[in-house]
Structure formats: C-alpha cells, structure tokens
Image (spheres, rainbow, N blue to C red):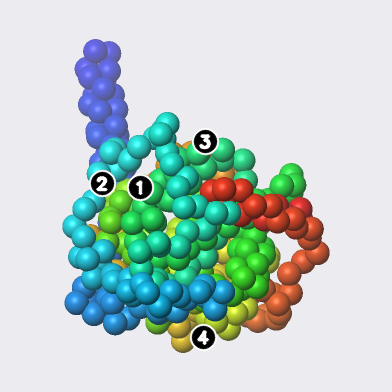
C-alpha cells in the first residue's frame, strides 16, 4: 500500500511538472508573439523637418514685424520625462494666452496650425491631468493649436469613429489643415515630439509604456495620429460602424492603406507616451467581423455618411467642447 502511494505521488509530481512546463512554454510563445516591434522603421532624424506639412489656417493673421517660428531646436530637444515623473496634479497651472482651448505663439509666426481632437466620455480625472499637461507641453512648441473635446453625452454604446468624424468636420469648418486624433489617456514624454502633420499620416504614439515601449504591430494607428484634413476627407474618415472599444483604428488603417497612404513615424526616442491607468472598457467582440465586412462591402460608411446625431458647441478656456448625442 505505501509503495503504491509513493508511485502515485511521483506520478502526480510528474503531471504537475508537465503542466507547469506547458504553461511556461505557452507564456513564452505569447510573449514572443506580442513583443511587437522595438526598432520599428521610422523617418530618419535628419530629414524630419523637411517631411513636415507646413501650413497654417487662413484665419491666422501673420504679423510682418515678427520672425518665422523655428523648429530645429524643438526637434533636437533631448528633454524627456520618465513615466512616473509625469505630474498627476496641477495646482498652479496657468491658462495664460489660452482662448477656447487655442494658442498662438506671441513672439513668432507659426508654420503649423493643428486641431487636436480628443474623443471623450466620463473620464474626468484623466481630463484634469490631460488638459494642463498638454497645454504646458504644446505651448513650448511654437505651433498654433486648438484642443477640441468631443464628448459623447448619451448612454448609448461608445462610438469613437463617429465622434472623430464629428470633430474633424468642425475642425475642417474652422479651416485647420492638420488634425491630431488623440486619446485622452495618453501623454507625450519627449519634448522633441512636435505636434505637426507630415506629408503622410503620422502615427505619433509608437512607443507607449503600457506596451513596454514597443509598437504592438506595424499597421497600428490608434492612440495618437496626425493626419492632414485633406487625407482625412480622402479616406472618408472613420467607419461609423464600430461600437464599444476597439477596431475603428484598425479599420482606419486599412482605409489609409487602400488609398496608398503609408504610415510614417518619428524615431522611438521622440515617440514615447505614458498611459493614464483606467479600467478596460468593454471590448467590441464583433470588431474583427465588421473589419472584414467593411473590406468586402466597401459601401459608403464614414465622414460623408454620418448617422443622425445632435451636437452643441461650447467654448471653455482650456478646450472647445463639442457635445454629441447619438
Ligand atoms: C484593437 C485596436 C487597438 C489595439 C491596441 C486591437 O486589438 O482592435 O482598436 O488600438 O488592439 O490596443
């Protein structure tokens, strides 16, 4: 009897070791698959300035007595924050020179006008960090910019694509030549990460701490993306069909690719972001299906075919709010 139980015990141990080994192999394979691209292809640092899309809105009156703003110092600024150094409170934030979320440098004529479109719902604590942090960051960049907060104010499923399309329409009406589509939970860490469009759509958040500072896949455009207004219109904006979390950015990436608009990126050392912690939103479990359906059907679905909605625009000092009821 004791002999048999010893045998059983050894067998049990073997099974446990085996299971443990299989789990380790599985975890290792998962790690390799999700490791992504550490050294992703990017624009060479020396040519960045020549690749930028220099255009301001016609509404901006350029002053003859001021010099043109320059950008080489910004693009070569090595200042960077470690993710845990990002301030989580802004007690003494100053809104100096901000009007309705917009800023124009006082000492020089900017070469860029950029509309920053932030889709939003129910993340007040993140917004309280995002707005002061971004204004402090952007006011150092010699650019003309305006932050639009596009808030979904109903209780329906979250629809980021529709919100971006609504925000883009407003920014285009305001004659912004460049749109930066921005998640509210992402904060840039590198001072050299100039908020400007390039000749091709520019994925700005290539290196996020949440993804171990590694680009998860090369066609990713989610997070922060700079795109010219003309390119946004050419691809008919975002699909309106993605509800809940995920997929709309992958669909947008497929639209860019169908229009032969390659994605460009700045080097890693200029593209780091920290992500503010939050609960994972409910995922859109249908996203893969809609994605492949959209590719097959290719019908009108986007900026030119927005579903019925109500909006109201309200100016605040730190942003222009576009409230949306779907
Ligand atoms: C989702 C995207 C998301 C990406 C990175 C994908 O599975 O479809 O929407 O941006 O993961 O989180």
Mark carried by residue 81:
2
Residue 163 rendering spot, x and y as whole percentages: 64, 60
Q: Which residue appears at 74% of the width and 74% of the height? A: 305
Mark-to-mark CA distance, 1 and 2: 10 Å
Mark-to-mark CA distance, 2 and 4: 36 Å
- Residue 220 in the figure: left or right of residue 190: right
Name the N-terminal-most of marks 1 and 3: 3
Residue, disc 4: 259
Name the N-terminal-most of marks 3 and 4: 3
Mark carried by residue 274:
1
For label 2, the crowd category at 10 Å Cα-Cα, with few meaning under 14, some 14 to 19 and many 20 or more, is some
Residue 172 rendering spot, x and y as whole percentages: 61, 73
Residue 81 rendering spot, x and y as whole percentages: 25, 46
Residue, disc 3: 125
- Mark 3 in CB contact with mark 2 (< 8 angstroms): no
Q: Which residue appears at 51% of the width and 69% of the height? A: 179
Residue 78 rendering spot, x and y as whole percentages: 19, 57
Mark-to-mark CA distance, 1 and 4: 31 Å
Mark-to-mark CA distance, 3 and 2: 21 Å
Name the N-terminal-most of marks 1 and 2: 2
């Amino acid at each position: 009897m004791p002999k048999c139980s010893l045998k059983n015990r050894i067998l049990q141990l073997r099974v446990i070791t085996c299971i443990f080994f299989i789990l380790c192999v599985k975890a290792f394979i998962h790690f390799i698959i999700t490791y992504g691209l550490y050294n992703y292809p990017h624009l060479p640092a020396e040519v960045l300035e020549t690749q930028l899309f220099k255009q301001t809105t016609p509404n901006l009156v350029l002053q003859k007595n001021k010099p043109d703003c320059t950008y080489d110092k910004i693009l070569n600024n090595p200042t960077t924050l470690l993710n845990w150094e990002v301030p989580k409170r802004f007690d003494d934030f100053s809104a100096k020179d901000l009007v309705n979320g917009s800023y124009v440098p006082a000492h020089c004529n900017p070469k860029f006008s950029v509309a920053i479109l932030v889709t939003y719902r129910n993340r007040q604590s993140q917004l309280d960090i995002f707005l002061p942090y971004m204004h402090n960051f952007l006011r150092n960049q010699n650019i003309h910019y305006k932050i639009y907060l596009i808030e979904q104010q109903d209780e329906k499923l979250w629809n980021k694509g529709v919100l971006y399309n609504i925000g883009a329409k407003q920014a285009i009406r305001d004659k912004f030549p460049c749109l930066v589509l921005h998640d509210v939970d992402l904060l840039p860490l590198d001072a050299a990460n100039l908020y400007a469009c390039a000749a091709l759509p520019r994925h700005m958040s290539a290196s996020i701490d949440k993804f171990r500072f590694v680009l998860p896949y090369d066609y990713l455009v989610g997070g922060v993306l700079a795109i010219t207004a003309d390119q946004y219109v050419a691809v008919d904006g975002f699909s309106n069909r993605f509800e809940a979390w995920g997929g709309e950015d992958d669909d947008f990436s497929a639209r860019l690719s169908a229009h032969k608009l390659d994605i460009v990126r700045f080097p890693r050392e200029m593209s780091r972001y920290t992500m503010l912690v939050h609960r994972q939103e409910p995922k859109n479990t249908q996203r893969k299906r809609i994605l492949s359906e959209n590719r097959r059907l290719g019908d009108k679905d986007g900026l030119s075919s927005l579903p019925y909605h109500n909006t109201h625009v309200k100016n605040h000092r730190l942003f222009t709010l576009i409230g949306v009821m779907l």
